[in-house]
Amino acid sequence: MLARLFPNPVLSGFVLVIWMLLVDSIGAGAILVGVILGLIIPRLTQGFWPDRIHFRRPKVLFTLIPVVVWDIIAANAAVAWIVLTRRNRDLRPVFLIIPLEIREPHGAMALASIITLTPGTVSVQFSADRTTLYVHMLDCPDETEAVEDIRTRYERPLKELLEC
Amino acid sequence: MSEAITAVFILIGAFFVLVGSLGLLRFPDFFTRLHGPTKATTLGLASLLAAFVAYAAGTESGVTVREFLITFFLFITAPVSAFMLGRSALRRRVDSVAPRPAAIDDDEAEDDPA
């Protein structure tokens, strides 16, 4: 019954939380409308979602989110420093080629987004079979290390979160 | 107190927005320029919104969390636009300081049968 009403529970939960933030209230009315929207919106957008999102180990979020937030702040400081002090001819921009272990499509998407939000890296292309991610890096002293960093900091936790 | 916190956040925010624009202006090619706005403005805008939250906390309207939603939406949409920009630039073979990886061409051939 519940599974039929909420085919995509994680998405419904997001809709509820976002609705409550939008109306800035935790009253019964806000919750009721939020739940109703959580019923309708996932249904209407079903065609856009490849699979339902399934958090296999939600606990991972508690370590992943702080890591990402911290890296975003560090990213900004690092990029700001490069903008202000580095001469163009001393920049070492490269395209990183990251072989993906993660197969879950939301995970791959989340990984690409996290990469764009963090230190001097922007995801620019997936290979056609979605097994490789191309990332442009603003200033890269060591390619292998940069790839390894992305894999251990973001890909492994995402894989743990979404795959078994 | 709330005014002091507001001021600090505004200064941090303004600094990052400025640096982001500066990066856009002075980096050598399209791909490096992409880094300026997608990075520096996310934290810049987040700080400006935090400044607003701090400011509102000092007035009678009290603490609001709605502004964090703006940050949240910004954080989920900024990477998408950066990705689309990067992808189209690769496809159009825009000049790049970083050497273009050969494997990308094979993938694009598969991508685009014409």
Image (cartoon, grey):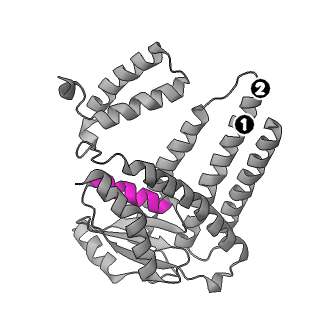
Q: Is residue B93 visible?
A: no
Magenta-tinted stretch: A105-116
Mark 2 / mark 1, whichever is N-terminal:
1
For disc 2, the chain is: B
Q: Which residue is mark 1?
A: B54
Residue A102 image position (x, y, % from top left): 28, 62
Magenta span has B31?
no
Q: Which residue is mark 2?
A: B59
Q: Quadrant of the C terminus of chain A?
A: bottom left
Q: Residue at x 36, y 22 (%)?
A: A35
Q: Main secondary structure of the magenta part?
A: helix
Instruction: Give the number of the disc on residue A39.
Output: none
Q: Are marks 2 and 1 on the same chain?
A: yes
Q: Residue at x 66, y 52 (%)?
A: B44
Q: Residue at x 45, y 14 (%)?
A: A28
**What element does badge 2 sit on?**
loop
Residue B71 image position (x, y, % from top left): 57, 43
Which residue is outermost to the bottom? A89
On screen, residue A39 above or below B72: above
For disc 1, the chain is: B
Q: Are marks 2 and 1 in contact (CB under 8 Å)?
A: no
